[in-house]
Image (tube, rainbow, N blue to C red):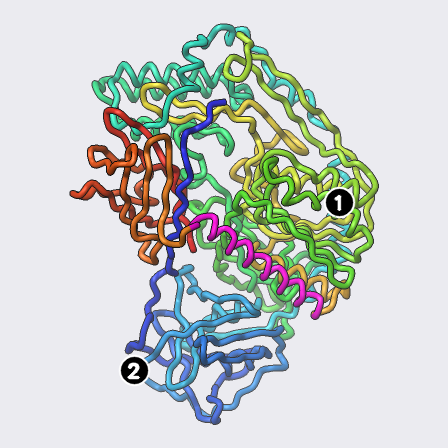
Amino acid sequence: MKLKRCLSLILCAVMLMSAMPVMAADSIHVVPINIMVGGKSFLPTDVNGKNVPVFAYNGTTYAPLRALAEAYGLGVGYNGEKNLATVGGTPSADGIASKGTAQALTKATNLTVTPINIEVNGSVFQPKDVTGKNVPVFAYNGTTYAPLRALAEAYGLSVGYDGAKNMATVDFVDVDGIDFEKILKDVTAQRKAEFTAPPEFDKFTSFLVDDPETKNLLTKEERNALLDTGERYVKTVTYEQAVSDVDLLFRALHVGYASYYYFGKDKFDKAEADTMAWLDGKTTVDVDELTDVLRKNLLFMVDRHSFVGYDIDKLEGIRYEYHYDTSKQFDKDDKGYFKVVNGTRYDFVSFSDSRVTMEPTLLENGKIVYSPVLFCPNSQVKPSDITLKTANGTVNEKINWTESSEVKKASRDPNFYLIEENDIAYINIDCYDNDQKSKYSGYAPSGRQVKDCKAVIFDIRNNSGGPGNPTEDWVRNFTGIYPEQREMIAHRYGILNSTNSQSKYEVEHLGAGKWVPNDIPVIVLVGDACGSNGEMTLNMLKTMENVLVIGTNSNGCALGGNCVETNLPNTNINADIGTMINFAYDIENVDCIGYTPDVWCDANKALDAAMNMLINNDFMGKETAETIKNTVAQKEKVKAEREEKELHPSGSGVSLKVGDLLVEGGVGFGASGTWNVTVLYKGKQLTDYEVFIKDTSIATVTKNSDGTFTLSVKNEGETEIFIQNDKISESFGLKGRKK
């Protein structure tokens, strides 16, 4: 496999939250509004007992935070040094109070307010309106105001609005929730049934075609050209060069791509024909445009490991996301889903969108309820309603979708650690790297160490995979039984990765799976950064009894692997060609979809929610949860500090060297995300060169008159910077990164 001559220039850009309507002391125009909490009129007062207003600003209802929290039965505090309001506790209808004697605001007016920060249950809270746009929290006349809907929904309360009465309503939903032991039992039974179903080995092997057409389809010279092309940026090529590269690309896929016959030769033939048709009539070809055409013509090739030009995840409407509205909470009985609001039973009838399903959902307070879930790409989200039936007829409620928040991206640091506290174990593992085995040498043995605990929390929300996977050994140490996944794996060998003139498939594993008895509840936390070998870790843990997966869908990076990295010789378009094909459980491609959890929960909230669930079910005490939570925070802080030192060893700039080329950052990593960069060649400043960037949506480069160039990082993501003239052609990887 060809190794890129590409160093990693990782830049930390401070990314501020979306612009808020109020960022400093300012005058805002508000209108009065009425509020009912739990069926009672809400007339708040300040700490001195004085009536204070409730109002609407820019379509969002605001109420005094302290009075609102107390009405929900929550505790509230304020840290003057940090300008920080805090809210915590569990909502209760017992907290409702109506202290005021009148509405303090009766007509539209202007108020002078200042912004303020807020934490809810120890986490930074960024409220959003019904459209998903960030909205502020602010102080007026010494009283902190918060958006009513956002705070209520953070605690799973039902929020409504009566336009005729100009009244917002907050209701306490009476939902008992799903019994923890019951859902653990149900999930175990369902998963065990999957292991007893007939495996699809015959269907899998039908995709492993030893095709005689591949014999001598690529010459050794063409193979060498694909593997040995140097890094460079090419703007345009001739028509003949483009045609040559396209022809070579599709022959390379035919020879080497392991999932070629899974997707179908006819689809690749059509993609090639469509690309050639696009080229017809051109004398010169823009390489970036050709890359886009190739990628879109290969859209059927949903494979996160293998791609042409750029990762498929950059294409709009591909990656599936979890969308939820936890203000809609339901129980289930023999009649179906239902909820009770202030003594009235509402039975579920239907969703307006047939894609919406009612799924087990874990709330932050640790209660498991049924709640609506929309699982689709962001581009396919649309407004939905839920129809409910009461004794007096049917009612419709609008579902306000919230997209699950992105888990912080895992680094290539294994970041393994084990926390044991009062017979509760917490295990974190972020990746596997054969060069860093010493950092997680204790991972597999920890299975033996925690086998007598009352419960285990296994955190792989950030596990990005990597070579090797000791999870089999962890399960064996934990249960005394060596596990076997239900999986089908094969490798393809041809001229790209072997000496075979005709490509051949070799089966590595056809495993029906082994069901592993286990009496200890294992809570597996999963998020959207869990991919590749991280997903194999997930599937290995699911071979055990009493495993409950909580969070969002995993990354969806499981189909391929063992990639041969190539570059087309004329255009330098990159093509990663996976020579492995892999399925778990059945013949279903989960790439860009991921493996779905047993119980849905926004992944960034999953640890706190899971610990609250264990508290509610007497597996652990609040003190134990607090200790684990604080220890996790400390270890993550140490990891972040370690990464910061690795990224910025001098704290004031960056020097990266490739051959005789040296790139030096001038002003360091400032909050502006802009750096002045000097280029040196053999120790002397280089001024006669061109500089390009592959993806200008992430960053831009501007050549300066003194021979330096200005680099401005705008967004998070990965791209490359190319520096070249008639003597040199080098590239540096760049990663825009939130700090």
Name the residue at 41% across, 74% down: 116
Q: Which residues are magenta?
A: 623-649
Quadrant of res 438: top right
Q: Which residue is mark 2?
A: 109
Asked if residue 354 can be seen in this view, the reply is: no
Q: Tell me: residue 289, above or below residue 46.
A: above
Question: Contact, CB < 8 Å: mark 2 with mark 1?
Answer: no
Q: Is residue 45 magenta?
A: no
Disc 1 residue crowd, few under 14, some 14–19, many 20+, Cα 10 Å:
some
Q: Is residue 645 magenta?
A: yes
Under circle 1, the secondary element is: loop
> Whole-percent x and y of residue 705?
16, 43
Q: Tell me: residue 104, above or below residue 319.
A: below
Sequence-earlier tag: 2 or 1 = 2
Under circle 2, the secondary element is: strand
Q: Which sits in the foreground, 132 or 517?
A: 517
Most distant residue in the left direction: 705
Q: Main secondary structure of the magenta part?
A: helix
> Whole-percent x and y of residue 259?
54, 23
How many dots with numbers?
Answer: 2
Which kind of residue does numbered mark 1 sit on?
A: Pro
